[in-house]
Image (cartoon, helix red, strand yellow):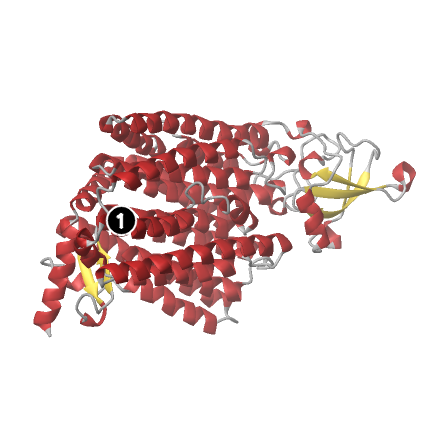
């Protein structure tokens, strides 16, 4: 144990234990929503502070290790905080806290109609505990337990509300992740059969004695399991269909964290257990290039903003795999920095999409327009993380991509140079995708939105589920409907995401029902009117106000993303240190075995 770190080592289990205890307490207090919210926020705030202390200690003094119950390796559960796991833990818990505040704001505004608070808070804290356990785990089976805990919680969160689309997406998500978990479990069995232990430090020492063919087979099994969870092409088809259906805060935390746990596992596997595997490194480089290209091309083909971001999420996983596959200090440092950047920016953008849906009533760019005029603050909240994701200098997205490009150039191989070109092209395609959203949803005037004669399929499903019922006190008489082919005036009777249903006056079109994009409804003075739930009664003149708590949480995430740019130097230094330790392997291994010796002496 490193000097001065003994006391802090006792804090290592708390990022797992505190959320689990908080989950139990919030479940008991299911009838006290205010206490539930306070406990959830307090627990995650404490975890963020603990994560910061652990990271500082790991950077200054080396890896910090705790063996639960003081059982020696390999009998005990080993928890390890090195610069990599500490950085991942701090970033993920900070984002989780901000998204929780956002979810509380949305629940208060919507009166928890779509997100049952009794279920949400306990499940959300269990998810946080699973993520923390995965990052801190020092053995494969405990890593598996962390995956299963966070996945069980994610199954519940994904299907909250019980709508048909969410249940359908949840089924796909569950099936894919159950398969990946089974593959992971098979990999764990193979590892134990080959080396007789599941402790990562011991595996790294004993795997050199395993025959190369057997080691390669085990390597590929584990990589397949983690590749599914990280959404690496061609194992990524499930993600764009699963994430967009969930509620905004759920999608934000999923996009920010769940795939990154898979990426983290790949980093550990490649750098600690199977270093210098040229065959797998080549496979990873090819997979990284395909992941970047397929994701980016998918993003530019989408009209729904949630799906655009889901495909960019897949695409940018490719950047991280690119750095890992290079297996050099420069490449791994770039990957670590980019993971931190992407967790923050991707979660921010999905939170902004939740605000967009609340303002415009839709997330499809074909049904949105005039958002910049309707809410300049919303436009700013979208613009900053969007250009950051696109890699515009001097933001953190540009810095991370520049580091990866530099690592590829230094590597100098033909495949690495190909990946450099692909990464630049992917960045341009990403910039095009987010710019298209800006131009159509924010910059385009509302009166230029094309009117669709056919209702969206998703809207028909929502209508079948009964979501289109609206209170009578929201009915308003509107003036002319721009682009309406038949009625000159109508009464807005119902509002549902993406459309406003008008029933024409008898003299204009007796009993007719026509679906209109929300943004096309306008008062008589011609001022565009958006009928999203955040802007008051349907047909009212647009208000620039946004829900304060949701907006504050989103703004905090934007500021956090900008702080990565301001503190890019120190942050990259931590990424460099994490990379050096990962490539060397010695600091991690020595810390684990030194803690075992200390525990034996203490006993």
Instruction: State the image coordinates of residue 233 (x, y, percent, origin top left).
Output: 43, 40
Q: Is residue 506 above or below residue 588?
A: above
Instruction: State the image coordinates of residue 469 (x, y, percent, origin top left).
Output: 72, 54
Q: In this view, does 466 lie to the left or right of 151?
A: right
Residue drawn 36% across the image and 42% down it:
560
Instruction: State the image coordinates of residue 537 (x, y, percent, origin top left).
Output: 68, 46
Q: Is residue 581 above or below residue 566?
A: below
Residue drawn 18% across the image and 66% down it:
73
Question: Is residue 5 shown to the viewer in this render?
Answer: yes
Residue found at the very far right of the displayed protein: 507
Q: Is residue 514 left or right of residue 549?
A: right
Q: In this view, does 4 lie above or below 541?
A: below
196 or 589: nearer the viewer: 196
Question: Is residue 41 shown to the viewer in this render?
Answer: no
Residue drawn 17% across the image and 46% down it:
581
**Few, some or many residues within 10 Å of mark 1 (<14, 14–19, 20+):** few
Instruction: State the image coordinates of residue 358 (x, y, percent, origin top left).
Output: 59, 45
Q: Quadrant of the N terminus?
A: bottom left
Residue drawn 14% across the image and 51% down it:
587
Q: Mark 1 points at which residue?
A: 213
Tell me where residue 415 sits by quadrant.
top left
506 or 130: nearer the viewer: 130
550 or 344: nearer the viewer: 344
Q: In this view, does 400 lie to the left or right of 158?
A: left
Q: Quadrant of the C terminus?
A: bottom left
> So how many labels did they put on this image?
1
């Amino acid at each position: 144990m490193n000097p001065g770190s003994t006391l802090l080592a006792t804090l290592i289990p708390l990022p797992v234990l505190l959320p689990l205890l908080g989950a139990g307490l919030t479940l008991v207090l299911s009838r006290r929503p205010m206490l539930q919210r306070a406990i959830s926020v307090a627990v995650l705030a404490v975890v963020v502070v603990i994560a910061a202390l652990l990271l500082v200690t790991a950077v200054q003094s080396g890896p910090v290790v705790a063996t639960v119950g003081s059982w020696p390796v390999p009998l005990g559960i080993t928890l390890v905080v090195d610069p990599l796991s500490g950085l991942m833990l701090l970033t993920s818990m900070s984002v989780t806290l901000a998204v929780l505040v956002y979810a509380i704001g949305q629940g208060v505004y919507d009166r928890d109609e779509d997100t049952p608070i009794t279920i949400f808070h306990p499940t959300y804290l269990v998810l946080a505990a699973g993520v923390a356990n995965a990052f801190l785990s020092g053995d494969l089976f405990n890593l598996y337990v962390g995956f299963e805990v966070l996945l069980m919680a994610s199954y519940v969160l994904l299907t909250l509300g019980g709508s048909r689309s969410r249940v359908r997406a949840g089924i796909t998500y569950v099936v894919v992740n159950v398969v990946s978990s089974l593959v992971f479990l098979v990999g764990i069995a193979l590892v134990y059969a080959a080396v007789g232990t599941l402790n990562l430090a011991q595996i790294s020492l004993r795997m050199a004695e395993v025959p190369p063919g057997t080691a390669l087979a085990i390597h590929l099994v584990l990589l397949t399991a983690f590749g599914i969870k990280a959404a690496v092409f061609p194992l990524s088809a499930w993600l764009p269909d699963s994430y967009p259906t969930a509620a905004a805060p759920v999608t934000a935390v999923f996009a920010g964290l769940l795939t990154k746990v898979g990426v983290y596992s790949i980093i550990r596997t490649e750098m600690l257990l199977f270093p210098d595997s040229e065959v797998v490194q080549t496979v990873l480089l090819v997979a990284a290039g395909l992941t970047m290209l397929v994701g980016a091309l998918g993003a530019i083909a989408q009209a729904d903003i949630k799906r655009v971001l889901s495909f960019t999420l897949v695409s940018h996983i490719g950047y991280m795999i690119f750095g890992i596959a290079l297996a050099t200090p420069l490449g791994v440092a770039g990957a670590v920095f980019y993971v931190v950047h992407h967790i923050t920016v991707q979660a921010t953008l999905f939170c902004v999409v939740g605000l967009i849906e609340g303002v415009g009533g839709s997330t499809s760019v074909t049904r949105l327009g005039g958002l910049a005029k309707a809410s300049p603050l919303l436009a700013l909240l979208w613009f900053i993380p969007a250009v950051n994701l696109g890699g515009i200098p001097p933001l953190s997205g540009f810095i991370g991509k520049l580091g990866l490009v530099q690592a590829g150039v230094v590597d100098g191989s033909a495949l690495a140079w190909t990946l450099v070109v692909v990464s630049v092209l992917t960045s341009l395609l990403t910039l095009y995708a987010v710019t298209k959203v800006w131009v159509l949803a924010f910059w385009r005037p509302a009166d230029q939105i094309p009117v669709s004669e056919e209702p969206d399929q998703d809207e028909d499903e929502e209508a079948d589920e009964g979501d289109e019922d609206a209170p009578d006190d929201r009915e308003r008489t509107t003036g002319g409907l721009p682009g309406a082919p038949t009625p000159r005036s109508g009464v807005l009777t119902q509002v549902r995401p993406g459309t406003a249903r008008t029933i024409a006056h008898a003299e204009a079109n007796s009993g007719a029902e026509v679906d209109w994009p929300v943004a096309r409804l306008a008062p008589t003075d011609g001022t565009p009117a958006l009928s999203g739930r955040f802007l008051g009664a349907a047909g009212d003149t647009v208000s620039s106000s946004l829900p304060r708590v949701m907006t504050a949480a989103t703004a905090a995430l934007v500021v956090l993303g900008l702080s990565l740019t301001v503190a890019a130097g120190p942050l990259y230094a931590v990424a460099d240190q994490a990379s050096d330790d990962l490539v060397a392997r010695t600091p991690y291994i020595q810390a684990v075995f030194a803690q075992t010796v200390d525990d034996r002496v203490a006993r």
